[in-house]
Image (tube, rainbow, N blue to C red):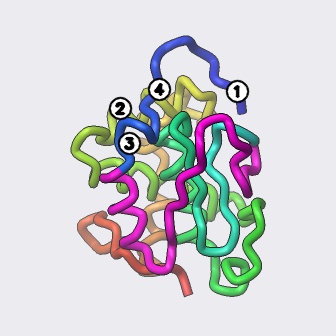
């Protein structure tokens, strides 16, 4: 993906401690900081996107917050067999991808300095595409199946809060 705008994007650098604390709630997921300028291991799209290898999520100062949350969402939403063999490509079908996007919004709501509205702006600026034209419109009008998917796999509760569990 390539960013479509020059607007500043929320970056991992500005929210490291709160992002790390949130991600660690999904045991055994471990955020690993990558030094500035170094290659991000396990990054599917390449730098500055977050990377996944096993239970490690690799983040660099310039990694967008939306990318950190999205890749963590993949780790949470994939089944145990795929998680055990995880090496860069999270895989999954369309329903799981939608669930990942939905979960990343719920995680953003857990970060006071981020929140859903700011995450939506960054997702749209980065180039996420939804048939309703924006991530906020998708979330509000077209994400019922994603929410149901997360509920079915017990990754959120009835109130729409993350359960802090991994898919079995």
Report if the CB atoms under discs 2 and 4 are less than 8 Å apart. Answer: no
Secondary structure found at label 3: helix
Q: Residue at x 35, y 32 (%)?
A: 118
> Distance between the Cα atoms at labels 4 and 1?
12 Å
Return the residue nearer the eye: 158 or 61. 61
- The mark found on residue 9 in the picture is 4
Q: Which region of the structure is painted magenta?
A: 17-45
Which residue was labeled with disc 3? 140
Disc 1 to disc 2: CB gap under 8 Å: no
Give the labeled residue for mark 1: 2
Residue at the location (35% across, 42% down)?
15
Q: Which mark is residue 101?
A: none
Q: Position of residue 89 (x, y in %)?
A: 77, 61
The disc label shown at residue 118, or none: 2
**Which residue is at the front of the view, 113 or 129?**
113
Q: Nearer the viewer, mark 1 or mark 3?
A: 1
Kindly report the distance in space between the C-alpha atoms of the residues bearing marks 4 and 3. 22 Å
């Amino acid at each position: 993906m390539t960013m479509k705008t020059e607007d500043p994007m929320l970056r991992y650098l500005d929210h490291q401690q709160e992002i790390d604390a949130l991600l660690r709630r999904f045991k055994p997921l471990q955020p690993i900081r990558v030094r500035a300028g170094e290659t991000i291991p396990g990054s599917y799209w390449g730098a500055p996107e977050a990377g996944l290898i096993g239970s490690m999520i690799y983040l660099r100062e310039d990694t967008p917050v939306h990318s950190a949350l999205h890749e963590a969402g993949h780790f949470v939403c994939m089944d145990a067999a795929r998680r055990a063999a995880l090496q860069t490509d999270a895989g999954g079908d369309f329903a799981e991808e939608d669930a990942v996007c939905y979960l990343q919004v719920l995680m953003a709501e857990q970060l006071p300095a981020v929140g859903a509205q700011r995450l939506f702006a960054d997702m749209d600026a980065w180039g996420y595409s939804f048939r309703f034209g924006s991530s906020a419109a998708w979330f509000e009008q077209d994400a019922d199946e994603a929410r149901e998917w997360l509920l079915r796999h017990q990754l959120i509760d009835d109130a729409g809060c993350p359960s802090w569990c991994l898919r079995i």
